[in-house]
């Protein structure tokens, strides 16, 4: 049984906690830097990345989290969590943790397409179709050479991985499909 932390400063953390527990693992809400010492992986949930970035600083978690990720702690950012991990944000905004070599565009689908669901096979993850829920979602506009593309929807990169770092534009925690959570647990088994 793995112990997965879910950053619980803001956003959709409860949904991740419930799914991790439903597939037989322990899940804890992370609100203090010390809690990062004894987990097998961490999920940064969806929510509002500007608020979450500020809270990471206020709660003095930011620098320690960056160190842990750089030394191999498996991390998965969904939606706002993906924005937090990026090295660069499109436009005039400062990036947050800057641990993954991707450039991310926030609210990339614009206000006309605020949210939508797609269902496709993501070969890296499973042979069956996986529902992808997008809510004011970002996508990746540029990647460095160490980044593996996991999936594109309509030509835009919506899932990618760089070693111990996984990002998805969409929210598997808002569906009853546990495939992505199982994939992340697997990443913690093969910790680099
Ligand atoms: N639009 C949000 C942001 O920029 C992300 C949306 C989400 O996490 N569902 O932070």
Image (cartoon, rainbow, N blue to C red):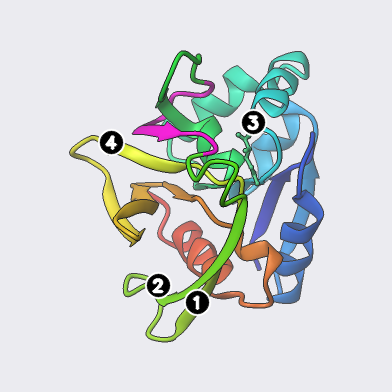
- As displayed, is residue 52 above or below residue 128? above
| Magenta region | 96-107
For the residues marked 1 and 2, what is the alpha-carbon distance in whole angstroms? 9 Å
Pick whichever of labels 4 and 3 is earlier in the sequence: 3
Q: Earlier in the sequence, mark 4 or mark 2?
A: 2
Task: Give the vertical position of 177 relative to 95 (above or below).
Answer: below
Answer above or below: position of 98 versus 24. Answer: above
Residue 100 sits inside the magenta stretch: yes
Residue placed at 49% from the left, 47% from the top? Answer: 74
Sequence-earlier tag: 3 or 1: 3
Image quarter in which the N terminus is found: bottom right
Judging by the rendered image, the residue that carries numbered circle 4 is 142
Labels 2 and 3: the sequence-earlier one:
3
Instruction: Tell me the element at label 2.
Output: loop
Within 10 Å of disc 1 (Cα), the crowding (few <14, some 14-19, many 20+) is some
Which residue is most to the bottom? 128
* Mark 3 vs mark 1, CA separation in Å: 25 Å
Question: Does ligand 1 reach within 8 Å of label 4's beta carbon?
Answer: no
Look at the numbered disc 4 and give the secondary structure of its residue. strand
Residue at image mark 3: 49
Do we see residue 39 in this rendering?
yes
Secondary structure type for disc 3: helix
Residue 137 pos. (x, y %): 55, 46
Q: Of circles 2 and 3, which is in front?
A: 3
Badge 2 vs badge 3, beta-carbon distance below 8 Å: no
According to the picture, the residue beneath numbered tag 1 turns out to be: 130
* Corner quadrant of residue 115: bottom right
- Residue 97 horizontal side relative to residue 91, left or right: right
Residue 147 in the image, given as x and y percentages of width and height: 27, 44
Q: In which quarter of the image is ligand 1?
A: top right
């Amino acid at each position: 049984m793995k112990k997965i932390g879910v950053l619980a400063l803001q956003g959709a953390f409860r949904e991740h906690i419930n799914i991790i527990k439903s597939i037989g693992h322990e899940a804890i809400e992370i609100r203090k830097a010390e809690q990062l010492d004894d987990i097998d992986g961490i999920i940064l949930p969806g929510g509002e990345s500007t608020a979450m970035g500020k809270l990471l600083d206020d709660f003095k978690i930011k620098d320690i989290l960056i160190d842990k990720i750089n030394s191999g702690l498996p991390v998965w950012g969904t939606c706002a969590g993906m924005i937090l991990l990026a090295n660069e944000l499109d436009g005039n905004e400062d990036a947050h943790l800057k641990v993954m070599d991707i450039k991310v565009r926030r609210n990339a689908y614009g206000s006309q397409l605020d949210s939508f669901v797609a269902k496709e096979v993501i070969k890296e993850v499973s042979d069956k179709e996986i529902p992808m829920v997008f809510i004011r979602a970002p996508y990746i506009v540029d990647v460095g050479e160490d980044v593996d593309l996991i999936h594109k929807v309509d030509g835009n990169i919506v899932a990618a991985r760089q070693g111990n770092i996984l990002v998805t534009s969409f929210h598997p925690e808002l569906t009853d499909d546990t495939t992505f959570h199982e994939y992340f647990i697997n990443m913690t088994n093969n910790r680099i």
